[in-house]
Image: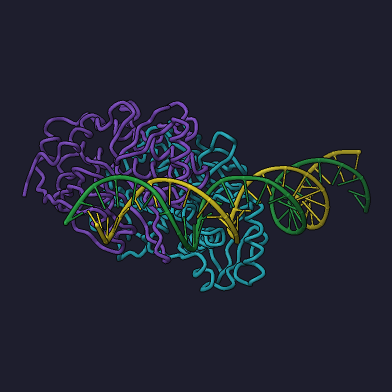
Chain colours: A purple, B cyan, C yellow, D green
Amino acid sequence: MGNSAAFAPLLSRLQKTYRLEAADLDAISGLPINLKRLGPNHTIVATGERPSACVLLVDGFIYRSKASRNGGRQILSIHQPGDIPDLQSLYLLTMDHDVITLRECVAGFIQHSALRSLVRERPKVAEALRHDMLMDAAVFREWIVNVGHRTAESRIAHLILEIYSRLALINRTKGGRFEFPITQAQLGEATGLSTVHVNRVLQRLRTQQILESRGGGFTIQNESRLKEISEFDPAYLHNAPTQFAQSD
Amino acid sequence: MGNSAAFAPLLSRLQKTYRLEAADLDAISGLPINLKRLGPNHTIVATGERPSACVLLVDGFIYRSKASRNGGRQILSIHQPGDIPDLQSLYLLTMDHDVITLRECVAGFIQHSALRSLVRERPKVAEALRHDMLMDAAVFREWIVNVGHRTAESRIAHLILEIYSRLALINRTKGGRFEFPITQAQLGEATGLSTVHVNRVLQRLRTQQILESRGGGFTIQNESRLKEISEFDPAYLHNAPTQFAQSD
DNA sequence: CGTCGTATTGAAGCGTCTCAACGTGAGTGG
DNA sequence: CCACTCACGTTGAGACGCTTCAATACGACG
């Protein structure tokens, strides 16, 4: 089921961020990929599993989460087209968390073996993927601060700005507006807040004309105010190409 | 200032965990290292800096943290002898957090250039260090759950069990006892709780004969109860040697 | 037109925070 | 050897942010 269009968001991101050469991009789009359309709330990989393939998200959103005993969930990260949410499974045998669709998705499965030969043949690609894994950790660090240190408004504002910034990189924003069909319950699972409280915070932000949330998306109406509330500083996303360390 | 004894905790951990060969271990202990004795609460690397060396912790504890505007701090991880807390700086140019001593420490500085040639010459070492970086991320994930989802007792119990498990790997525990000179204020910064509340939780655990905290260390008196409270599951530490994925 | 997932609202409870005071032990200098 | 200081731990009381429970509203969809 090879389908090279599936690689479009990944290639565009890698090219923009890492300035890969054509040969590298070709090697990626030549990977055998098994595309699937997945329903909402579908567990792609579960805690304890030992996957033999990675997931490339092509369309929609995926989150990673850990379940706690009492049925609760903590969402750890949210992924957008072009992301490989479980890239670490290439080197960390057992999954310590779940990978779940936020809504309907299109995702492609790429065998670990194929990825391993890719990184063996193409050092620049290996570098890019390694950088992706480290950015993953940088985002986790920021999430620890978010749920550990910030107020409810701040947490939600921060999450929204992170998603917004990352979606902007793949041109999925129009002005302050972006599509992001997350429920208030899921927002609560990501921020460590109850659904009820998420609702009240969103209402407050809406009333103050700071953030509009409706119809499977958000509109940032007052960006500077939202940034103020969130303490958002995009440095942790390590995106500016000038920020990349040389490999040797 | 080469001093190969400085590598002892690192080598012991790598050997035990990754089964490196003698040649690999020799290559590591041949690295030029600049040893320093550091005072308590000393910032080794600060947010925004672009270090050209990594820190190998030889004795004592180091934490990584992010500062927030209002003077608060969120501790992201706690490191023990044999750890290289800022290993990611080898590939992520700019620091997105601080690296700070918990108390007096002995630490060695290893130039990035030396580490880069090491990983170029020694694929097995490169593999081990990559695994270390991924475990780092796995610990961050668990911390997100800790501060986002758990009660105060659970957070503290979990942190203590994580430290305990990791110290056990380097033989720094005696029965349920281990030295860990953290203040209640720092415990609060790690768990997202106020100092006052940390104090009350520790008192409760002490009264119930579950966890004794005194004199720069802890004694786990009722391990099964502590595990129950903490929801601690060591799987996220990815330690069992059988858990390691093959590189190809 | 009923159903189901999601959003909204109200009210009561409680876990944790803040503030402010006090205790304690180690280290320091007179 | 005592007085002082300083960091850290402990205690009490009141405030508040957030949770929980439970009911209601809304909107998409078969």
Residue A109 picture location, percent across and down: 16, 51
Q: Residue at x 66, y 59 (%)?
A: B200
Q: Is residue A64 found left or right of A39 in the rendered image?
A: right
Task: Using residue A223 as the reference point, say whether residue B24 is left or right of it.
Answer: left
Q: Is residue A63 visible?
A: yes
In the image, farthest residue toward the left: A1
> Is residue A10 toward the left or the right of residue A68 in the image?
left
Q: Position of residue A18 (x, y in %)?
A: 25, 31
Can see residue B1? no
Quadrant including the C terminus of chain B: bottom left
Residue at image location 25% in from the left, 38% down from the top: A128
Q: Residue at x 15, y 51 (%)?
A: A37
Picture residue at 61% right of the left edge, 47% below the top? B104
- Report which quarter residue C19 is drawn in: top right
Return the residue nearer the eye: A189 or A96: A189
Residue B165 higher or lower than A56, as above or below: below
**Total marks in image:** 0
A241 to B241, vertically: above or below = above
Query: Can you say whether D11 is above or below A176 in the image?
Result: below
Residue A68 place in picture, x, y as percent: 41, 62
Task: From the top left corner, tell me how far across and down residue B181 is, in percent.
Answer: 62, 55
Q: Nearer the viewer, residue B8 or A244?
A: A244
Up-down: is B182 above or below A213? below
